[in-house]
Image: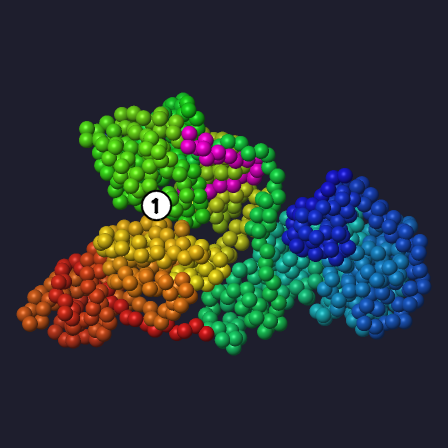
Amino acid sequence: MKKIRVYELAKEAGLENKVLVARLQEDGYQVKSHSSTLTEDEAREIRVKLGLLQTETKEKRIQDQGRRTIIRRRKAVVQPPAEEAPAAPESPAESTAPAAEEAEQPAAAPEAPAAPAEGVAPPVSAAPEAGPAKASVEAPAAEAAPEVEAEKAPKTAAEEAPAAAAEPAPAAAEEPPPAPATEAPAAAAAEAPAAEPATPAQAPERKGLARVIKRAAITITPSPEERPRPRKPEKGKKPAVAAGEPDFDDAAGKKKGKRFVKFTPEVDRGPAKKGAAGKRKRKAEVVAEDFDELGLVPAGVRLGRGGRGGGKRKQQHDKPQFAAETKAIKKRITVYETISVGDLAHRMGAKANEVIAKLMGLGVMATVNQAMDFDTAALVAAEFGYEVEQGKTEEQTILTLEEEETGGELKPRPPVVTVMGHVDHGKTSILDAIRKSDVAAGEAGGITQHIGAHHVRAPQGEVVFLDTPGHEAFTEMRSRGAQVTDIVVLVVAADDSVMDQTREAINHARAAEVPILVCINKIDKENADPMRVKRELADLGLMSEEWGGDTIYCETSAKKGIGIDTLLDNILLQSEVLELKADPQRHAKGHVIEAQLHKGRGPVATVLVQQGTLRVGDAFVAGQFAGKVRSLINDKGEQVQEAGPSFPVEIQGLSGVPQAGDEFIVVRDDKMAKNVSAERQLKLREKELATDSKISLENLFDRMQEGEVKELMVVLRADVQGTLEAFSSSLEQLSTDNVKVRVLNSGTGTVNESDVLLAAASDALIIGFNVRPNARIQELAKREKVDMRFYDVIYHALEDIKKAMEGLLEPEFIEEVIGTAEVRQTFHVSKVGTIAGCYVTDGKAERNAQVRLLRDGVVVHTGQLSSLKRFKDDAKEVASGYECGISLRNYNDIKEGDVLEFFVMKEIQPEL
Ligand SMILES: Nc1nc2c(ncn2[C@@H]2O[C@H](COP(=O)(O)OP(=O)(O)OP(=O)(O)O)[C@@H](O)[C@H]2O)c(=O)[nH]1
């Protein structure tokens, strides 16, 4: 027999796995997790409950109903309706439980007769009412009073509204009316205005149900607490309305429904979706539900579906079902990772000030935009009587589905290559030469469309080249989590030697653990000396195969087209070793290589498919944007219908422009794509507000303790090579059994952008000696949350790192740069020394601040001011945009173009 997994049903019902699992467990199914299996019969039963059989034909539904009816009849056989009916009146003022029972009884009475006559319909109507009433009592009630249809009620009630203990009463009131109208009032007496004469509803099966709806609407009028929540009755009604399904009856008024819909984030909406109407409703609600599920909708904010045609009916169906749960749930807030103070207040319907006050009470100082973690949010929410629950994101659901997705077999895929090297060593020329050897390009008349990557079909095989040569782009992609390159081709000019960027490229490729293939270019040049290049590279650990190493070397002349074939051969050889494979049958997944807003076509993105096959019409998420593939264009500018693994294609159909390096993933449908997109946008916002998680000397020890850090990676910069070497060797000696210290990249001169990107991508620290980064780099580091530390003395840096590794680093002071000034002119005044005529470019210059003199980003001197003047007057401080005269204490070597950086040391308050 075919087994069906819970998550499949959850997917069908658009429910979260855990919600469905909980519900099934509640219903007595033997399920443990979303991957538990169910028999077909069980699945069918559940689908009926969840309203998923709505799409079936009428006849089928009728059959379903019939099945149910049969069950009921069984009970009907036992029927003691008449007896129970009388019982009801006796326990009028009882608590909910009794009320429920009573409700059932009366319901049973009327139904019993109806059932035989019409089948399912009548019982349904009765059931719904009883259901809500029983919520808590359900099971026992059903058994105890083997009423015919009452059963249904308990079932549905159980599924939908365990929480609705208090409300059931009113519902019950409605139900009883039919047969023992008198009892109804009695039972409901305590609770109920709801007791309105629902009687007519039961009499005629479907018609009656329809009527009930109207009444239900009337019922709503009672005070909010008493609102009857007739869930099951809907079943009866639905059939009437929507092709006789056994669903439910929206006894609840439209108004009610709207109200409830607002709050219910993860309420099981399954049942509501039953009928054909349910389907429609589902669509109409998509947005509201999605946002609600995501917790994006603050409590109290209506997620109304507007007054569009059909909407009302849909609402009615939902409402009753959620009604019971609503009360409990509206006091619950779903938080994913963090939530801002403002958001939390909004969702609780409280003022941000109140929340801030509570936080202060807890010893936390926060601003309205500050993010709180889950635990803090839970504490604060509790103070307001709210419960906070950890949200499970749709993204996690995707991951689970992905894991469970059984695709086809893994097939070999072409390698993806990035070309790196020093400026002018010939990267672009090599790419051009390779492109010329592309058979397909030749066929297409050499017309190529620049889409950021090209797929070369050489006689030797297929290779994909990324068109963004250089290690910066490579590392920037990697810092965004995109590891798309399989092989790095390192271009070194034979007439030149290993240069700075050659070294950087090697370090970047190594940090990404991507194999390097060396291409010695420009061998046509007279002064070409490939051997020298090989020797230099061997010193850097890239030993050629012919010398016993494992690095493949090839020699080319991009200009003359020499060696290009060999280069391609070698790339394919290397890729064979890597055994690159992908499953073309899965949902497509890959990364955005580049994206832009095109004038006529809107947002377009070039993606590299890494897994599965991407097809026109696929719903997808790229970064924080959702979309549906409208068209696919390959690197030759041709429209294609699909793209398999390693193929770069340009897609149209995005809702926004993603960033290079963003993940691209095809999902089940548009709805899921939108959900994930909304989730990501929310997360991004939260992340921006949240504190960083990157490595820093302060958090090093904690992260070591948590086992997150096994290797401390460092990017070094110093004014002179000697310092670098001395520091590197001492630093590596700090390695312990638990943590290895590794220098990722080092170089002379100040910190540059690629250092920051490398550190960000590799979770590394940047340490500089006598160098200072410019404002742009500081800004970038801040954005990428990279910890940069600057020292004058090697010993201090080593001491800090050692302390940090031992958890003893207690930063008491932190340097705060308050301003910078540019030296525009210098004057020498005898007995005073050099006076610098400066222009304050940023912040302010302060007489008592410390100052650092920078020349080309390198610290030349650090000390204090001896004077700060505005014209002839001494000044305490000079603001940005003004000129001033500055002299430094005991230092005269100031030159035009130097930069003065003013800073103060601020004491850090120890954390409580
Ligand atoms: N003689 C000779 N010149 C070459 C060869 N390859 C490239 N060149 C020349 O070297 C110069 C730089 O080549 P590019 O391909 O632009 O180098 P690049 O590494 O892409 O340079 P950037 O994009 O600036 O980083 C150009 O003038 C090319 O014509 C070669 O194999 N032989």
Looking at the image, the residue that sits furthest to the bottom is 361
| Whole-percent x, y for residue 597 in the image | 41, 44
Task: In this rendered view, identify the residue nearer to me: 823 or 331.
Answer: 823
Magenta stretch: give its range: 573-597
The reply, left or right, for residue 801 in relation to residue 675 is: left
Residue drawn 62% across the image and 43% down it: 404
Task: Say what amino acid the circle numbered 1 marks.
Answer: Asn
Residue 56 lies, with reference to residue 296, above or below; the image says above
Residue drawn 41% across the image and 46% down it: 478
Q: Quadrant of the N terminus?
A: top right
- Say if the magenta span includes residue 575: yes
| Whole-percent x, y for residue 103 in the image | 84, 64
| Whole-percent x, y for residue 463 in the image | 42, 31
Task: In this rendered view, identify the residue nearer to me: 527 or 730.
Answer: 730
The answer to which image quadrant residue 185 occupies is bottom right
The answer to which image quadrant residue 542 occupies is top left
Residue drawn 52% across the image and 41% down it: 589
The answer to which image quadrant residue 102 occupies is bottom right
Write down the residue under mark 1. 507
| Whole-percent x, y for residue 565 in the image | 35, 25
Task: In this rendered view, identify the residue nearer to me: 570 or 868.
Answer: 570
- Say if the magenta span includes residue 770: no
Looking at the image, the residue that sits furthest to the left is 830
Residue density around tag 1, few if under 14, some if 14–19, many if 20 or more, within 10 Å? some
Secondary-structure class at tag 1: helix
The reply, left or right, for residue 742 in relation to residue 104 is: left
